Amino acid sequence: MRRQEWPQQDDSNERESVNIPVQNDVVVLGGGLAGHCAALAAAEHGASVLLLEKTPNYGGSSVQAAGSFAFARTDAQREMGIEDSEEKLAEDLVSASGNRADPVLVGRYVELQADTYEWLKRQGVEFHKIALSSNMSVPRTHPTNPRQLLDALHAKVMNNARITYVPSVAASRLLRTGHGSTVTVNGVLAYAANDAIEVNARGGVVLAAGGFSRNPQLIERFSPQMAKAMPAGGAANVGDGLLMGWSVGADLLDMSFVNGTFGMGLTRYPDLHLYAEDEALLRLAIYKGAIAVNLEGRRFADESMSYKTLGEICLRQPKAIGFQIFDQKIMELSEPAPNSHDLADAYKKGLVRKAASISELAGMLGIDAVELERTVARYNEGVKKGKDDEFGRVALSKSVGKMVALDTAPYYGFPCATAVLATYCGLRVNADMQVLNVYAEPIEGLYAAGELVGGFHGAGYMSGTALGKAAIFGRVAGRVSAERAAR
Ligand SMILES: Cc1cc2nc3c(=O)[nH]c(=O)nc-3n(C[C@H](O)[C@H](O)[C@H](O)COP(=O)(O)OP(=O)(O)OC[C@H]3O[C@@H](n4cnc5c(N)ncnc54)[C@H](O)[C@@H]3O)c2cc1C
C-alpha cells in the first residue's frame, strides 16, 4: 500500500526512533481538542491509550479557534447576573440547526456541558469573561485562549502514564473483521517513517481527526456552494477520519450544509487569496456594533445575523469580500478573549486600519468613499430610530444588544472574507459516540468525536458549540471505548 503523502514531515530521523505501542485498549486519531479529551477520558476510565497526531504539532483547528465554548447555567454566568438554562440552550441549539439537529445529540450536549466545563477547569483550562455571540438568546460564550486550552490538556496527556502520544504519524486505514452489518474495528494501519504498522485497539478506535475544510475535492463534492470560500483550519484537516468511517459503512449526515464564516481578516489585502495561515485572524466587530459593507461602500445584510448567513451573502458581493467598519467607541469594547473580539490586537497586527474620517478610511481600504459616507449617515439615522431602514437591524447579535451610531473618530475598518473554518458535518453517531452504519446500527469498536461528527449542527451553528462538541463528545467517546476494552 502506498504511503500517505504528508509534505511537512521532514523529521524522518526522529520518526525512525518512535516506538509505537501496538497493543492498546483505545487508539485515538487526532491531537486536537476532541482527541485530547477522548484520550484523557479513556485513561481516567483505566484504559491504555495511544494518541496519534498526523502533524508534528498538536492542536489542529482547535488551537486556531477563537476559543469560545457555549455553556449554560454556569457559575460565571451567575456572577454576571445572566439567567440561562439547559432548556434555553437546547432551544437555541435546535433553532440554530434549522430544526435539523438530532435530539439525541442535543440532549447529550446539554446533559454533559456543565460537567465538561468543570472538568476542563480541573485540567487547568482558564475561562475569561462571558460574551455574547452568534445564535445565542443570552450571552453564553465562555472564552478561552485556545493556545492555553490545548497546552493545558496536552500537559495532562504527557503526564498521564496510561497515554502514549505520538506526533507525525498518520493513521490511514481502519483494521476490521467481518463485513456489512458485522464489521468490527480492531485497530488502525499507521505510517511511521516508511513502515506501515498495524496498531491494535481492544476497546476501540476514536476518530477525532477533524473536518475536511482543507480538502477542496470533498468540499466540491458535498458543498459546491462553498467552492469560492477560503479554506481555513488545521493544515492536515483533509477528511481522513471521515473517509476511514465511510470506508467501513458509516452513514453521513448534514453533508450539504458546510457553510463559510464571515469575518476572516485578509491580512495581505489587496491580495485576496492569501492570509496568515499560522494565525487565523477571525474578527467579529459586527457583534460589537460595526457595520459590514462591500467594495461599493454599501451594506449587504443585517449584521446581527449569524456569521454563517453573512458568509453566504458576502460570497455574492463584488470580489466576494466585505469590510467591517466601526468607530472609537467600538474599538474601546475590544476584549482579549475570545480572540474574535480582540480588535486592539488585530490593529496591532496591522489587519485593522485607522483614519480620522470615514472618507479617509474608505480611501485606505479601496472602498467607494462617497457611498461609504452615505451608508454610515443612513445607518446612524436608523440607530437614532432604533431600527435601520435598509435591512431591519435592531440589535447587535440575534435580538440582543443595542445598535450604536458610528460617530466617534478615529474610525476603523478591515477587509475580510468568507472562509470555511470547519465542516461540522460527517459521521452519524449515537449518544455513546458509536459510529452508526446506514441502517443506524453501531459499527463495533468505532467511535467518533469532534468536527467530523454529523447530525449535531444541522443546517446552522451556534457559536462555541464546535469546541463544546469536541470536548463533550470526546469525553464520551473516550469513556465508552475504555469501558468496552474492560469488558
Ligand atoms: C479560525 C477558527 C476559529 C474558530 N473558532 C471557534 C470558536 O471560537 N468556537 C468553536 O466552538 N469553534 C470554533 N472553530 C471550530 C473549531 O475550532 C473546530 O470545529 C474544533 O476545534 C474541532 O476540533 P477537533 O478536535 O475535532 O479537530 P482538530 O482540532 O482540527 O484536530 C484534528 C487533529 O487530527 C489530526 N489528524 C488529521 N488526520 C489525521 C490522521 N489520519 N491521523 C492522525 N491525526 C490526524 C489533525 O492534524 C489535527 O491535529 C473555529 C475554527 C477556526 C479554524
Image: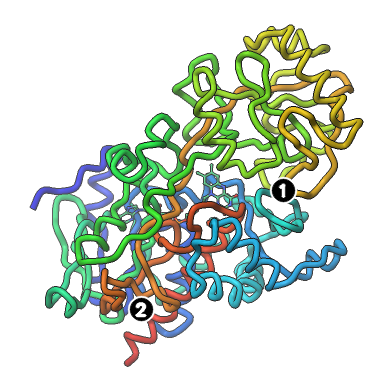
Q: Is residue 277 left or right of residue 366?
A: left
x, y percentage for residue 282?
Answer: 59, 37
Q: Which labelled disc corresponds to residue 398?
A: 1
Q: Assign the C terminus to one quadrant of the image.
A: bottom left
Q: Quadrant of residue 18?
A: bottom left
Which residue is farthest bottom? 487
Within 10 Å of disc 2 (Cα), the crowding (few <14, some 14-19, many 20+) is many
Q: Quadrant of residue 94?
A: bottom right
| Earlier sequence position, callout 2 versus callout 1 | 2
- Spatial distance from mark 2 to mark 1, Cα to Cα? 45 Å
Query: Which one is in front in this view, the residue at disc 2 or the one at disc 1?
Result: 1
Q: Is residue 404 left or right of residue 72?
A: right
Residue at numbered disc 2: 48
Q: Secondary structure at mark 1?
A: loop
x, y percentage for residue 361?
Answer: 73, 13
Indicate the amino acid at tag 2. Answer: Ser
Q: Is mark 1 within 8 Å of ligand 1?
A: no
Query: Measuring 69% from the left and 36% from the top, which residue is drawn there?
Result: 303
Query: Measuring 50% from the left and 64% from the top, which residue is drawn there?
Result: 101
Q: Which labelled disc corresponds to residue 468?
A: none
Which residue is farthest left? 1
Q: Is residue 155 left or right of residue 348?
A: left
Answer yes or no: is residue 350 visible: no
Which residue is farthest right? 384
